[in-house]
Image (tube, helix red, strand yellow):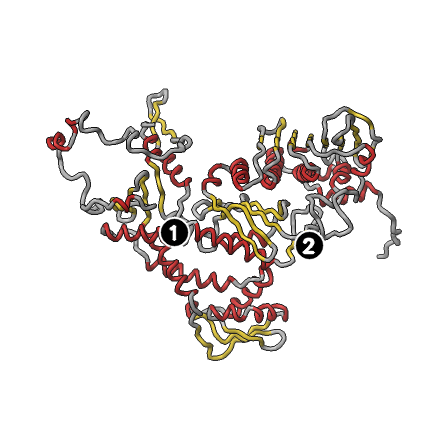
Amino acid sequence: MTTAPRTIRQLTDTVINQIAAGEVIERPASVVKELVENALDAGATRIEVATAGGGLSLIRVTDNGGGMPPEELPLAVSRHCTSKLTDDIHDIRSLGFRGEALPSIGSVARLSLRSRPEGTDSAAEISVEGGRVSAVKPVAANRGTTVEVRDLFFATPARLKFMKSERAETAAITEVVKRMALAFPHVRFTLTGSDRNTLELAAVPADGEGLLRRIAQVMGRDFAENTLPIEAAREGVSLSGHASIPSFSRANAMLQYFYVNGRPVRDKLLTGAIRGAYMDALPRDRHAVAALFITLDPALVDVNVHPAKADVRFRDPGLVRGLIVGAIRHALEMSGMRASTSGADAMLAAFQRPEQSGAGHATPQRYTPPPRPAHGWNAATSPTRPLEMSTASGFAEPGQAAFDVGAALSADARAGEAEAAPELMRAPLGAARAQVHENYIVAQTEDSLVIVDQHAAHERLVYEALKEALHARPLPAQMLLLPEIVDMPEEDADRLSAHADFLARFGLGLERFGPGAIAVRETPSMLGKVDVSQLVRDLADEIAENDTADTLKERIDHIAATMACHGSVRSGRRLRAEEMNALLRQMEATPGSGTCNHGRPTYIELKLTDIERLFGRR
């Protein structure tokens, strides 16, 4: 069957803009992202976003930025017109630069652009409806710019079938605004509309303390209380921000925020770096919470990978990944031992107090702990302080003799007859007081109660000791009787050859065997019988993607973790007071001892102020 020849013709500007809109404007949240970026590039310090119908009916973004004169409004809604880019495409120092957002939005929606430049007493407005541009007309407006988008995708109704529910689109818009707000703490953001609750993020100083306050506004107070400051620099690339302690994690990676030169991005390299940094501190189904900011020369990163500008490519991805992994691991080591504050809150919430219902039955109600006071527990002012002898002599030690019915604690629960030394009470984990159910150590500090999972805690201690012993020197290798030849693409063989010295430290001896093959002569003794071909191919794939060969190290660390699990103090073993206190002191001296090898907390600390509130004494 033959077809008639087709004539090549130039597409109309409207069709061109609609094609571009399919890449730039995926959903209402994409419109909000582009308009907020324009407002930030204009120097705005106050941005207000209003929506209706999940953004499909209305999106209005108002800012107090520099504004635009009337003669520039037609250019603003024309394709490939921008004030943010010079002739050097690699020198991008603004969020927007392609000049596609406004014409793309105007081709699929009803758009109006109203602006008043600083220092003028009049404003102007231009409208675009389905690609048709109106004439500029004078209007009244405050300084800055207001962009109003109505009936999104009315010109391309087929796109509406791919939109999610109004609630889902509203949530996506909220997420976009929050991501932008983290990068610009000095800007006030307000998000309102008939389809949402009002969100207001007040401006804070653009310093370390201000950033932490903005993080608390966006990501919650819990994260701000369970975070580690991250600060590092290497070869012109600097990293800053905050990452959670291992015992504070989530079931997904949605609360991982990455910024490159102030631009929010999504990148598998950065996500993988977070996973690598917490490799032996979190299980595979848990994810750290982080807000990381990478700053580098614009020439070292390509932000022009996709029209939506969410994906980036680094010139040296290995450098960036190594910087993130090294900085987070250093922060975890330097942080010492910390337990998540959410653990204590969860313990408090687990206690229930009955309330009488109308039918006369007790209805359990969860206890919600109020905000903790700024001051700590004080024995002199606490309602639970010991009674004074002068005012309660009847219940002093001599007076209680008549009521003595035996020892308060059984021998199994007591940590020892001798009183703990005062210096132990001042230690972070305090002095061991009891062992409960032959697995949980109850310790006392000057102002808190600590409960330690003895098996999980000792498992981490043994694991860290094993790792230090394993990585302090090259691992023993077992030589194969016959070298195993693994055929693979030439570029994969090149990558493995370049990492041969690193792999040899872990007991994997390999060398080039012709243009498209690798000869493996030694394998790590710890791995025992191993599928050499699969191991080498997995390493080649990882090096190709991340420029690292951590797969082998992960396997060895996994074996060390298994050995630690089987070699640690088992649940059900009774410990003497000296053993319990020795375990507590080792935990205090071991980095990362707040979680076990599987990411579970090793201890929970409950402040006495919380206990007093639990019993209604505060």
- 294 on left or right of 286: right
- C-alpha separation, residue under disc 1 versus residue under disc 2: 41 Å
Q: Residues within 10 Å of mark 1 (few under 14, many from 20)?
A: many
The crowding category of the residue bearing disc 2, from other C-alpha atoms within 10 Å (few below 14, some 14 to 19, many at least 20), is some
| Residue indicated by mark 1 | 593
Badge 2 amino acid? Ala
Let me know if residue 359 appears in the view: yes
| Foreground residue among 69 and 60 | 69
User: Where residue 142 sits in the image (x, y, percent)?
Assistant: 72, 26
Q: Residue at x 38, y 58 (%)?
A: 463
Residue type, mark 1 in image: Ser
Q: Secondary structure at mark 1?
A: loop
Sooner in the amino-acid sequence: mark 1 or mark 2: 2
Which residue lies at the image location 19% right of the left edge and 46% below the top edge?
418
Residue 436 seen from this side: no
Image position, residue 79 (x, y; %): 80, 42
Q: Quadrant of the N terminus?
A: bottom right
Q: Is residue 395 above or below residue 83?
A: above
Quadrant of the image occupied by residue 161: top right
Instruction: Give the quadrant of residue 404.
Output: top left
Residue farthest along the left direction in this orientation: 402
Q: Which residue is mark 2?
A: 299
Residue 530 versus residue 465 in the image, above or below = below
Tell me where residue 307 appears, x and y as whole percent. Answer: 71, 47
Q: Residue furthest front?
A: 119
